[in-house]
Amino acid sequence: MLNQFTEQFKESLKSEENAWLRGLRADAFSFFSASGFPTVQNEDWKYTNVGKVGSEQWKVGGKSLSDPELIGAFEALLKNFDYKRNGFTALNLAFADIVCIRIPKETKLEKPIEVLLTGDDENTANFPHVLIIAEAGSKARILETYTSLGKNFTNTAVQIVVEDNANLTHYRVQKESAEAFHIGTTDVTLGRGSLYDSTNINLGAVLSRHDINVKFSAEGGECFVDGLYMLNGSQHSDTHSVIDHAMPNCVSHQTYKGVLNDKSRGVFNGKVFVRENASGTDAKQSNKNLLLSNEARVDTKPQLEIFNDDVKCAHGATVGQLEEEELFYLLTRGLNNELARNLLTYGFAEEIINKIGIESIKKQLDEAVLNRLNANLEA
Amino acid sequence: MSSDVPIRLAKVEDARLIANILREAFAEFAANYTPEAMVVVTPPADEIAGRFEEGPIWVAEINDEIVATVSVVPETEWLYIRSMAVLPKAQGLGIGHGLLDAIEKYGIENGFNRLFLYTTHFSTDAIRLYEKHGFRRVRDTSAEEWFGTPGLSMDKKLGKDIGKMLLEVKDLHAGIEGKEILKGLNLQVGKGEVHAIMGPNGSGKSTLSKVLAGHPTYEVISGEVLYEGRNLLELEPDERAREGLFMAFQYPVEVPGVSNSQFLRLAYNEKMKHHGLEELDPLEFNDYLKEKAKIVDMDPQFFKRSVNEGFSGGEKKRNEILQMAVLEPKLAILDETDSGLDIDALRIVAEGVNKLRNAESAIVLVTHYQRLLNFIVPDVVHVMANGKIVKEGGKELALELEEKGYDWVKGAASSR
């Protein structure tokens, strides 16, 4: 089926020098052409209508990397990407603008690796695809930042492998422009005794969706999958996460928080699977939402599916307003109503932002939160 | 009452004569003191000479002869009066009042907020003199405390606003969800005073605290609350706070994600702004906060932690008193501040509160137990039962209550 991307795809494929990759891209594009973008009839996209993405005209930006030698080491990982999940994953692979990061064995990096993904001119569509392999025993931090200036469409995918006993901290900051569309997928595979700690901050885009999938592929892994969505105006932000305890004795922690103002809307769908053989699993999941206006709305669905008895699991979700007792406490200290409310909201968001271990970035996010609240708390 | 006898500041050269006066004046009580105590009340001339380093000494003269003396030692914001003596032949001339007037003038001019002294029960004339001069008995001191001779301590607050009305609650009826809990409560609190409100569970103590602080779920049915002559009930909780009302919570609330120092600086600056005073930037405030933290012996590492989050019960209560120290309220209501504290934590909290006592402000202690009042000695004790005050008295009332139990006053609620 012809679509707005058909001509652009033909053109871009010409510059692809890797035969295997050319084939992969072509397959992915055919899948997209057949499926199109998902609709709200699809259970996974029930709350997030992406119709507007398809109705806009997009010019594909960026350039595909085609260094055969470099990409060779990542062939297996890339081929492993399940592009058939939906039209977005397929379209991402078809146009994938590939970035490869390998942290060598036993290497400990002091400074974070920064991947800055910036939208180009108005009405461009970008398809970053970041491949990260943290080799055995390595330790590193990755900062993945999305920004844009106008009406852009970012369709991104990140594949991460944390090998045995490696330790990877991952900050994902999405602060695209208020008109941007942002669709992203993060797939993580964890090796034996590895640690993956991710913090996902969603502040930007009029429509955003992030799917994060973490799979334990060996025993003794641990992950933190935390996030914040702070929305106002008519922003819509959807997080779908899957944490798959496929192996025994792994630990997962998940805290997602939402702050929703005006007519914004948040969606949180978190699945935790504990497979039949995954005894000794410890899984905690929570999603807390603060609604600052009567018109804001959140749909939250934490789900635990447990097929083993020898596990410790806890999950829960809350949706509410600021606590009256907390508010009263601040008022009795002389803070006016607006300041007290802002301070509590700031504190609510700060629990996640405080996880960011890069001082300059944390400060930027603090400021972004305060700007959102239109508050001067002189942090 | 003041005498016409000239009173002047003593000089070091007067030391020998001062020692003589003390010896002569205290001679008649020698049998009542232990030998050790006698040495302390009648020190030799060289020791008197050394005292000039510690604080001023006054003498009174008749015909160029020194007939009376007194000295003071500054102890932070208080003045400790010691070695007061009037020769027997000069008594009855108002010299004692003259000396106390001189001390009081000195105290006020130099910013002290309280005079205090220790005396003995057998010094009945002296006690009468102090009481006439506005001193009150604070507590009895044991023999172990003072060289084997039991006695008592007395004090007098200094300042022009002493006794000026700060809070007046008139026939207050209030409650929650349509249920009347306060049933005609009256209370008057003057500046410089410490009041204790005691009562059994359910007597309405906490309701009174909450109503005064302006908690939104409590409703005032009728009555009046004047704060510095203004209608307190018209003010929002935050306005009350900026006007100097403070409530230490029985269960301080945790505020995750907001650091203690950030929170305290915002609160402090809001108050400053309200009064048209200069706000402090983070560095200046940090210095200010460090000073205040000493009052409750709080480690500065608490400043960076989220407000009350993960604090122990004792740490939370200390943090409340730290907030009080930072905000310098005119009226502090401490709601069951002693609950859940072990004896060490209680002592730290109480000492902190004592350091914050001053002539310009008042403290209301709301408490179920007498224990706290061993450490923070109130001027007035009120007993609440069934939504009103049923008994009032001095600090002894708390002890009596402890002994007899609340059943003793419960009956009074209906008969009054």
Image (cartoon, coloured by chain):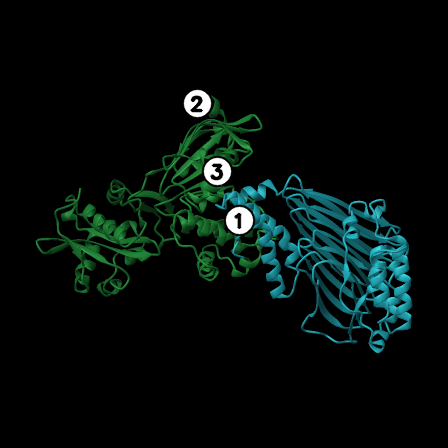
Q: In this view, does A292 lie to the left or right of B3?
A: right
Q: In this view, does A261 lie to the left or right of A207?
A: left
Determine which quarter of the picture holds residue A261: top right
The image shows residue A291 at horizontal and vertical percentages of 65, 43
Name the kind of residue labelled 1 in the image.
Lys
Q: Mark 3 points at which residue?
A: B236
Nearer the observer: mark 1 or 3; the answer is 3
Tell me the green chain.
B
Mark 2 or 1, nearer chain start: 1
Q: Is residue B161 left or right of residue A219?
A: left
Residue A268 vs B211, above or below: the answer is: below
Give the spatial CA distance, label 1 vs label 3.
24 Å
Q: Mark 1 points at which residue?
A: B317
The tag on residue B16 is: none
Tell me the cyan chain.
A
Say which quadrant the C terminus of chain B sits in.
top left
Residue toward you, B74 or A320 = A320
Q: Marks 1 and 2: in contact by CB < 8 Å? A: no
Residue B376 seen in render: yes
Mark 3 or 2, nearer chain start: 3
Mark 1 or 3, nearer chain start: 3
- Secondary structure, mark 1, is helix
The tag on residue B416 is: 2
Say which quadrant the N terminus of chain B sits in.
top left
Q: Marks 2 and 3: in contact by CB < 8 Å? A: no
Residue B378 vs A246, above or below: the answer is: above
The image shows residue A44 at horizontal and vertical percentages of 83, 48
Nearer the observer: mark 2 or 1; the answer is 1
